[in-house]
Amino acid sequence: MSAGQIRAPLGRLLSTVALGAMLAATPAAAQDQDEGLFTLLGRLILGTGTAKVAIDTPQAVSVLEQADLDREQATSIGDLFAAVPGVQAAGASARALGQAFNIRGIGNTEQTASEARIIVTVDGAPKFFEQYRMGSFFGDLELFKRVEVLRGPASSTLYGSGAIGGVVNFTTKDASDFLVDGSDNALRFKLGYDSNGDGMLASTIFATRVGENAEFLGALNWGSSGASEDGSGAEILGSGYDRVSGLAKGRFTFGNDADQSVTLSFSRSDSDLDDTVVAQTGGAAVPSFGTADVHTVDDTFTLAYNHAASANPLVDLDVTLSYTDTSVDKTNFSLGSFCSPGTFQVLCDNDAAYKTLSLKVENTADISSGAWDNYLTFGVQLQEQEREASSSIGALAFHPEGTDRKLGLYAQGEFVWNDRLTLIPGIRVDFGETTPGTAAAAAGATAQDDTAVSPKLAAMYRFNDSWGVFGSVARTERMPTLDELYSSEGESFSRTTGLYSAARLPSLNLEKETATTFELGATFQREGLLAEGDSLQLKATVFHNDVDDLIATTPRPTSPTPGLTPVAYYSNIRAAEIWGAEIEGSYDAENWFAQLAYSNVKSKDKDTGLTLADTPAENVALTLGAKLPQWDAVLGWRASYYDAITTSSATTSAGSYDTHDIFVTWTPDQGAFKGFNVNFAVENVFDSTYRNNLVQDNAAGRTFKLSLAKTLDW
């Protein structure tokens, strides 16, 4: 079956509901372990201040738990967000190292500093990596048990100015996730297989409890895959990989009522791609850059202290010290003979790394009184990021080295009246200082300092137990990154056109990007809607985002003769407008469940009137399934529809398509197979050939995935 020719996702959705209803009608009895498994809006959100249920949070938020990650059997970030509105991957379709995040039309892999507009953390440690035609996140997804997405700049208060797109928080596994009551030790084995590329996975986790106050976890994962194929059988070049990852984590509790804890965590993901494409983001650039061997190492270290102070409502203190080091080494270029100073230096053996040291101190005070529940969160964050980049013939001028230091001060209030009205004001001020490396300074770069301010106000009102409305206004400023300030490039000559291009100098006069966003939404939730014990939850959001002083690459003037006046590498060239709507819903009953995720993002370059290149196509995903407790099984079907879209770039314009996936989960809780967890899925069931507009390659064709896990405890 070829990609569907649909005019709009919602129209095609209606024609498939009947098929899903037949699947969902499978008879079954209740099963406690399935309660809440598919009600995403009923889950706790931890990253917005005090913990709140998603549907009662005055912001567009989503969270994926361990059961979701197991079911998706994700090997790249693009696999994670199939049922999350407003979030997807950009860049490569099947290359584990070629993807970046896109939230509401913010984020891609082709524009320098694009990922600076989305903040990513692992166990609270800030993560960042950006290199020409590389992805931005290289952690092994087997390490994580939870992924939380906070959409929009309202998250800037707690995480840092500049989160125009939002925040993605990853949480690694804990020993307590595997230790059951009455057992102090657990050993978990997992094997996985992916038919498209003959991918293999093996994982071992050991968890132990020492006394009443200490627990430890050690995890080791191995994964390998050959190249994947699209629906037509064509190989997706460079999509094979080998990866080893590990996690060591310990937690100690002490104090009155065990209200204090220290958590120490270290994780590493080590990936090898031999003879892979240099342009990991894919697309038309693949043959121009040839192949190379790519080796990445992604380290994250965190030391976290929490003092809940059960006897003192004014103290709930979190202190997190973290260090991250993400490096990419490229060697053995197939086009290495062209290695030379200037533009072709990208074909020289090279390495790039970001090393980030961060300290975050945050306290939440409970100052509740009378009918008001009042919480005040205030904190300070210190961060130093060092960018390293060099090649076999010297420094990379277009990937400059340097140091970026930030000091952030912030405060956020949460005021809840009578469980009806919620008000969340907040403000953050970040002070930034950047210092160029030796080579960048020699090219004219100088130290820069700046200040960014991010205020917000969010509110929610519940009319009754079913209906609620919410809204927010948030403004954030993003200071220029090291790349944007200090990149340079000498004059170059094109053998193809016979023209000289002007040199580019460091961009020392850039203005901050600013984004002002308005959100308005409504929620609905009800139990016992169609049958006793069922529940329906819906959350709809509309948003409007004005982004001013966008930073982009300055066009290079050309001439048949040398000597053109140099230009700044980057400049503030335009303002943009991004708006749209999202709907997230879930229905859970005794015998079946359903999920809905709809996203429609529109945008406009205010100078040209064209749709911004990073804008995702309108899309909707419908999941319907049945619970079979007599067999300890859950089965489901997901249909995803993407409309056609034309943006300002032919690269991110694409036609419409639809895909269909099925999944089965078996988790026996008694008998000889107790402790097993089996997940089976068929993705792209009809083997469609298609390309998402934000992705540079065709997507993978039909894929069978199987994982088998067994936990032993004693």
Image (tube, grey):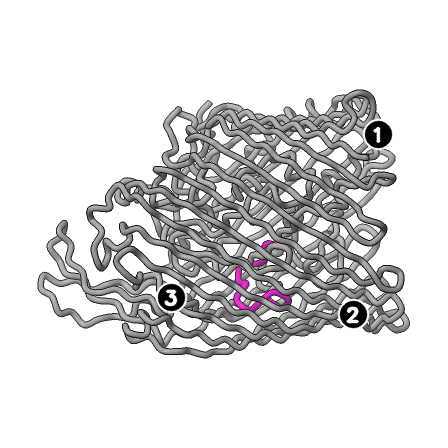
Res 373 → quadrant: bottom right
Residue nearest the observer in this picture, 304 or 105: 304
C-alpha distance separating marks 1 and 2: 38 Å
Residue under numbered circle 2: 375
Numbered disc in front, either 2 or 3: 3
Residue 158, above or below 75: below
Q: Is residue 161 magenta?
A: yes
C-alpha distance separating marks 2 and 3: 42 Å
Residue under numbered circle 1: 30
Q: Residue at 46% across / 22% down in the picture?
A: 1
Q: Secondary structure at mark 3?
A: loop
Query: Label 2 near label 1: C-beta < 8 Å?
Result: no
The disc labelled 2 sits on which kind of residue? Answer: Tyr
Q: Secondary structure at mark 2?
A: strand
The disc labelled 1 sits on which kind of residue? Answer: Ala
Where residue 410 appears, as percent x and y from the top left, is: 64, 74
Res 144 → quadrant: top right
The circle drawn on residue 401 is 3
The disc labelled 3 sits on which kind of residue? Answer: Glu
- Asked if residue 368 can be seen in this view, the reply is yes
